[in-house]
């Protein structure tokens, strides 16, 4: 019997799931701390955030100091490692990130503003925005005056604000919307940070391919995670103690009433251990972490000598530093709260420091039962099926996720840029230029530049091939043409199309007039193909054949067979003896195959004279004359065309650029006329 073929088992190869783009309901938060970076991903589900990924990476070197990025390259490298691990876990391509700003120079100003409405009205979002914008402007004005008086020349951004209290017809109220009244008032706290703190944060995120979707302040993020709104009727305070800074926030009567930052934290303890026992930073960190868990600590100092010390001995050596740390944090709490709070929550990695809870309790003269480590209330806004969230280290990153995912970030001062909420960091007067620069546009996007010209010489004479003109940028504010200096207000809608740079001129040897019929043609002293691409400075020599040139002219002057039409009957052939008047055209017999009789060709008419070249256009740019040839397409020069002649280095502009045409502020898409006086200069503050 013939054998039946043996069936081989079918092998199924499972395809890896495709990587999806980050969905709209997924929030990715990065908490960039002094000692480590923590990344958390959450998915918004009704009124909570489900945490689906947590990752953490410690800095190998001190790339952060007091909450501020010092080495962008090192921080971005570390953040990118974490981002890739989270993407691999979730099979998601992360595109947007939520962050929180910190820094050793956080400043706050409190201000209020009130409106008297014409009669009792329904309070809507527009009225609330006007109210808050007025209070913000007063806070900014006070901040600038204080800075000027102190001689502080740094540029600060308004990075956020928190409403402490609304008032409706003199009565305090937590939310004005949809109520009716005539007199409304808002009392708020505005927060300012140096520009370098904010810009370094955005630059770091940009380097790893992430768009910043929202930004809040670290103390606000921390309190949003640790103290839910239903507890804020009580007078509570939160201290998030990190490695470089301690974020502090206080609340009462249902609102956040103050926040600040102390530039003392866990690093002070670490540095004391380093000096006391001659150990490096990493060893000191390990000692600090083991004080509460080990009775005897063993380590080697920088000389290689082994040390064995009891935890009591080490604790005594850091006691003075710990007391100073607690004293300074306590002073900051009283500064924003007026007195010791009813209860105090401790968060962050520093909250685990031995003796810290007891030290703060003593410094604030509080009952020890009213000071606790945060974490018990995280579940009010976030939960996870995979991770234990009850960890004070997660306070700020969880707070960032919660703040963004549950829309707890105050955005009443809202501006829309190209159909999306714009990033707003105000610094005094807030102009369209400020807005564009804060949202990733650069001067080359705003101003544009013409394509580079190509300059060659033909038989010793200069020949220019012109690059194409830039297409000017378009700026519309509330659907009307705007200027860079226009002040932006709450609720404005901005539409901006970046300038499109002109294309550089491109020409081949065959594009030179007469090159294709030249008797001899050389490029930079050598023979070359007509298809050779020309470069700046090329020298072309053309030797023409005079006979061919003359023959070409005669041929061009004669009518072609197809266009010849006889309008008169053919004349009889003239005899040789017939007299030809002097003023009559000479009759030349021409043989045409389709005609048996000769026809008469008129004497060629002289070619129309070549119009003289148009004169150059003269502008006066930065007090110097600038002569430019007319554009080949006849279009005018624009202010954007002048950028390439102004001397500005578009890659390294740090100050404001002033644009003036005939003494008035210019628009980058403004057309120019012969004789215009133009100033394009960077104002260095």
Image (spheres, helix red, strand yellow):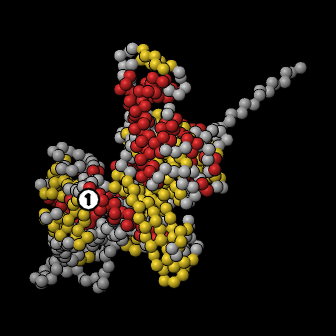
- Seen in the picture, residue 111 relative to 55 is either above or below; the reply is below
Q: Residue furthest top?
A: 305
- Seen in the picture, residue 313 relative to 384 is either above or below; the reply is above
Q: Give the quadrant of the N terminus.
A: top right
Q: Residue at x 47, y 71 (%)?
A: 185
Residue 683 percent location from the top left of the image? 23, 59
Pointer 1 residue: 149
Classify residue 256 as left or right of residue 191: right
Residue 680 percent location from the top left of the image? 22, 62
User: Callout 1: few (<14), some (14-19), or many (20+) C-alpha neighbours within 10 Å?
Assistant: few
Residue 334 percent location from the top left of the image? 44, 51
- Seen in the picture, residue 60 relative to 244 is either above or below; the reply is above
Q: Residue at x 40, y 45 (%)?
A: 262
Q: Give the quadrant of the C terminus.
A: bottom left
Q: Nearer the viewer, residue 305 or 80?
A: 305
- Whether residue 156 can be seen here: yes
């Amino acid at each position: 019997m013939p054998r039946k073929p043996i069936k081989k088992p079918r092998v199924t190869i499972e395809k890896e799931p495709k990587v999806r783009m980050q969905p709209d309901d997924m929030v990715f938060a990065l908490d960039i701390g002094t000692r480590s970076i923590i990344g958390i991903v959450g998915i918004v589900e009704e009124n909570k955030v489900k945490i689906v990924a947590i990752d953490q990476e410690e800095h190998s070197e001190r790339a952060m100091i007091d909450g501020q990025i010092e080495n962008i390259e090192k921080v971005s490298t570390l953040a990118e490692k974490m981002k890739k691990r989270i993407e691999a876990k979730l099979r998601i391509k992360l595109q947007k990130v939520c962050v929180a700003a910190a820094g050793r120079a956080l400043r706050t100003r409190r201000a209020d503003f009130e409106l008297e409405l014409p009669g009792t009205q329904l309070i809507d979002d527009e009225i609330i925005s006007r109210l808050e914008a007025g209070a913000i402007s007063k806070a900014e004005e006070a901040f600038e005056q204080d800075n000027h008086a102190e001689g502080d020349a740094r540029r600060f951004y308004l990075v956020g604000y928190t409403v402490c209290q609304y008032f409706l017809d003199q009565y305090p109220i937590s939310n004005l919307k949809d109520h009716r009244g005539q007199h409304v008032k808002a009392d708020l706290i505005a927060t300012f940070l140096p520009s370098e703190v904010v810009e370094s944060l955005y630059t770091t995120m940009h380097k790893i391919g992430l768009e910043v979707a929202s930004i809040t302040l670290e103390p606000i993020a921390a309190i949003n995670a640790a103290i839910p709104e239903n507890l804020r009727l009580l007078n509570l305070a939160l201290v998030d103690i990190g490695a470089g800074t301690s974020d502090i926030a206080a609340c009462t009567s249902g609102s956040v009433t103050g926040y600040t930052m102390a530039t003392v934290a866990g690093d002070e303890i670490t540095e004391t251990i380093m000096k006391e026992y001659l150990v490096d930073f990493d060893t000191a960190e390990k000692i600090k972490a083991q004080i509460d868990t080990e009775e005897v600590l063993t380590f080697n100092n920088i000389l290689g000598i082994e040390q064995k010390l009891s935890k009591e001995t080490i604790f005594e050596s850091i006691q003075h530093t710990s007391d100073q740390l607690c004293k300074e944090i306590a002073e900051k709490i009283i500064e924003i709260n007026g007195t010791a709070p009813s209860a105090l929550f401790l968060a962050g990695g520093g909250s685990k420091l031995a003796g810290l809870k007891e030290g703060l309790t003593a410094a604030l003269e509080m009952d020890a039962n009213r000071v606790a480590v945060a974490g018990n209330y995280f579940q009010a806004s976030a939960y996870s099926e995979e991770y234990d969230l009850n960890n004070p280290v997660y306070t700020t990153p969880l707070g960032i996720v919660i703040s963004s995912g549950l829309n707890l970030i105050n955005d009443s001062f809202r501006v829309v840029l190209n159909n999306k909420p714009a990033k707003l960091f105000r610094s005094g007067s807030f102009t369209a230029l400020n807005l564009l620069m804060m949202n990733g546009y650069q001067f080359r996007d705003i101003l544009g530049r013409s394509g580079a010209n190509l300059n060659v010489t033909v038989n010793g004479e200069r020949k220019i091939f012109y690059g194409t003109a830039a297409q000017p940028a378009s700026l519309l504010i509330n659907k009307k043409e705007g200027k860079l200096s226009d002040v932006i207000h709450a609720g404005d809608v901005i539409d901006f199309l970046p300038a499109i740079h002109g294309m550089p001129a491109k020409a081949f040897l065959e594009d030179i007039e007469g090159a294709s019929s030249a008797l001899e043609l050389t490029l930079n002293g050598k023979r070359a193909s007509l298809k050779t691409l020309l470069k700046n400075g090329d020298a072309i020599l053309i030797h023409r054949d005079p006979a061919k040139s003359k023959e070409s002219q005669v041929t061009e002057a004669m009518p072609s067979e197809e266009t010849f039409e006889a309008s008169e009957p053919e004349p009889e052939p003239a005899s040789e003896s017939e007299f030809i008047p002097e003023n009559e055209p000479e009759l030349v017999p021409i043989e045409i195959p389709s005609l048996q009789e000769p026809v008469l060709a008129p004497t060629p008419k002289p070619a129309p004279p070549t119009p003289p070249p148009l004169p150059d256009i003269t502008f006066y740019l930065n007090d110097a004359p600038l002569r430019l040839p007319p554009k080949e397409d006849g279009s005018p020069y624009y202010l954007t065309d002048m950028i390439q002649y102004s001397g500005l280095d578009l890659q390294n502009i740090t100050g404001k650029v002033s644009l003036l045409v005939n003494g008035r502020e210019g628009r980058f898409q403004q057309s120019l006329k012969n004789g215009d006086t133009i100033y394009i200069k960077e104002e260095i503050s």
